[in-house]
Image (tube, rainbow, N blue to C red):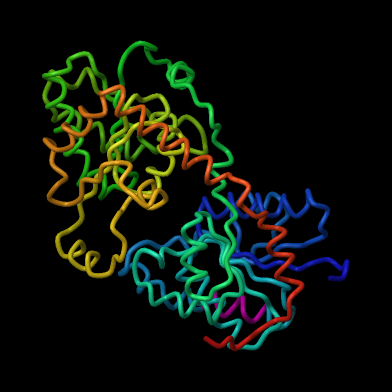
Amino acid sequence: MSTRKLKIGIVVGEVSGDTLGVKLMRSFREQGIDAEFEGIGGPQMIAEGFKSYYPMEILSVMGIIEVLKDLKKLFAVRDGLVEVWTEQPVDVFIGIDAPDFNLRLSKTLKEKNLPIKTIQYVSPSVWAWRQGRVYGIKKTIDLVLCLFPFEKNFYEQHGVAAVFVGHPLAKQLPLNNPIQDAKRDLGLDPVKTYVALLPGSRRGEVERLLPLLLGSAKLLSTKYPDIEYLIPAINDARKTQIELSVEQSDPALIPKLHILEHTDTESKIGRMVMNASDIVALASGTATLEAMLLHRPMVTFYKLNALTYFIAKLLVKIPYYSLPNIIAGKKVIEELIQKQATPERLAQEIESLMDIEKSKIQSMQHLSMHKRLISGDTQDPVQAILTLLEQPVQNEKKE
């Protein structure tokens, strides 16, 4: 490869993508590689010198109806980027997460026969549901940078080039993580037992799932009056919502419930609460990965609208819902889904984790998976990108 300056296109759609993007930019510079970056970036990337043609928020659209409403605008953004890169092509386009937008952009770049390599950094959950999407990825993506080892295995089975680069959070969080330090950081009593209650971060989730958590806390408080409960609130709106729900709880329980609000711009209060808790009860989602990387005993749960759950059951092709179980390939943590997610079952599972031996075994399994995610099997994403750039461009890829 020549020593000329590389032009790298990146598109991110949310804060986590901005964090990955800025780390990637810094890694290029730390390795002495002359590169310029453009596309759609967040504030961290822009502060690092990224040229953003559109604000990142333009891609932060959730829900089917909302996406349909904004479809015209999203197509205009895609076409705008294609126009820019048709006139002045980048060497490689890296879509960080935001697969609905980024995979379509990669497809358009391939159809235009532009001399641009395409990379998807953070795999969409094709291994879990709508597995047919892998054939589209095979045609339009030259390389997938995977956060989890099982993703690389899935792509290799389908003839898609993929490398396992490890999860950035696994590298960031320490392998040795004493709970006493975490309790002290939150000003908690070091000898008290705390249970973290995490109903999710969105308004609808809190509305649907917080009553379940409070119901289980009420059941437990009669049997274990000394246990206290920590509920994180990621912003003022969630704090107000949680407070209203707590006020309607059993008066005897209210003094044992502590709502903790974020104290910094990165809003890490959820992580801090889980880290300082002896047991974590949380809604299924990416927070289960955080709890695993903190090595805390946990139980997860989720309840969906009945019709949504029925459709999801038809589409989901894996036996587990939570990332710790998917990574392990077996049940490491209990999952209470739909009808199983009752205050009684949740209280029962929390109580079972009060068994020192059982909770210790689960924590050791978490540590083992944490080590696996930062193992020597991971590749450096910058080196994987440079290796791809040395290969000839292949447009109109065949299956």
Residue visible at 32% across and 32% down?
280
Answer above or below: position of 272 versus 50: above
Magenta-colored stretch includes residue 244: no
In the image, the segment drawn in magenta is 76-84
Residue 288, can we see it? yes
* Number of numbered discs overlaid on the protein picture: 0
Q: Residue furthest right?
A: 3
Whole-percent x, y for residue 355 in the image: 26, 23
Say if 179 sits above or below 201 in the image.
above
Q: Position of residue 168 (x, y in %)?
A: 57, 46
Observer-nearest of 286 and 36:
286
Q: Which residue is at 66% across, 84% downward?
A: 394
Residue 12 showing in the rendered view: no
Task: Give 12 or 107, whichever is nearer the viewer.
Answer: 107
Q: In the rendered image, which quarter is residue 361 located in?
A: top left
Point out the image quarter for the N terminus.
Answer: bottom right
Q: Is residue 42 left or right of residue 363?
A: right
